[in-house]
Image: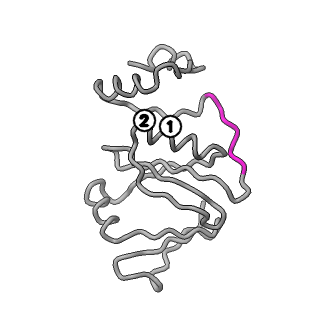
Amino acid sequence: MRNVTVDAHRAHPRERILHDARRGVRARIEGSDRERLRAQNGPMQVRFARHTDRLDEIVRFYRDDLGLPVRGEFRDHAGYYGVFFDLPGTGAHLEFTSGAGQAAPTPDPESLLVLYLDDAELQRTAARLAGRETTPTNPYWQQNAWA
């Protein structure tokens, strides 16, 4: 379990600074943004985080090819670089980081991120990705990837 604390003494009254003692990372969360998310999504939000050695490629894929909105990014924060993407309609975010001398985990063909798109968005995305399709290793996804 990670040791995450809130430093309210040095923060503006409508802002909190989160400090992750294990990584020495601080992140500012604006009070109005936090309140808006809570009103939309309830008392809990989710962010999926993944470290990578290919941050620029990943940004181009999720932002340009899939059209996910960039929620924020950071550069050279204690040696880390990162970007946050909204997953529209879910209240969840994707975070990708690189740097700080940390190698990315070895990819596994069963580690999937499955996005469900409505028919119109699926057609637009498929057109943008035409010619770059891959075949999943899992037979279920081989049969149902476009279902």
Mark 2: secondary structure: loop
131 on left or right of 23: left
Which residue appears farthest toward the bottom when viewing the image?
9
The numbered mark at residue 121 is: none
Q: Residues within 10 Å of mark 2 (few under 14, many from 20)?
A: some
Q: Position of residue 48 (x, y in %)?
A: 50, 48
In front of the other: 53 or 32 = 53
Residue 42 percent location from the top left of the image: 30, 56
Q: Main secondary structure of the magenta part?
A: loop
* The disc label shown at residue 66, or none: 2
Q: Amino acid at mark 1?
A: Phe
CB under 8 Å between discs 1 and 2? yes
Dividing the image into 4 quarters, which one contains the N terminus? Answer: bottom right
Stretch of the chain drawn in magenta:
103-109
Per the image, the residue denoted by label 1 is 61
Q: Is residue 66 left or right of residue 74?
A: left
Q: Residue drawn at (34%, 26%), measured in percent from left and top?
A: 124
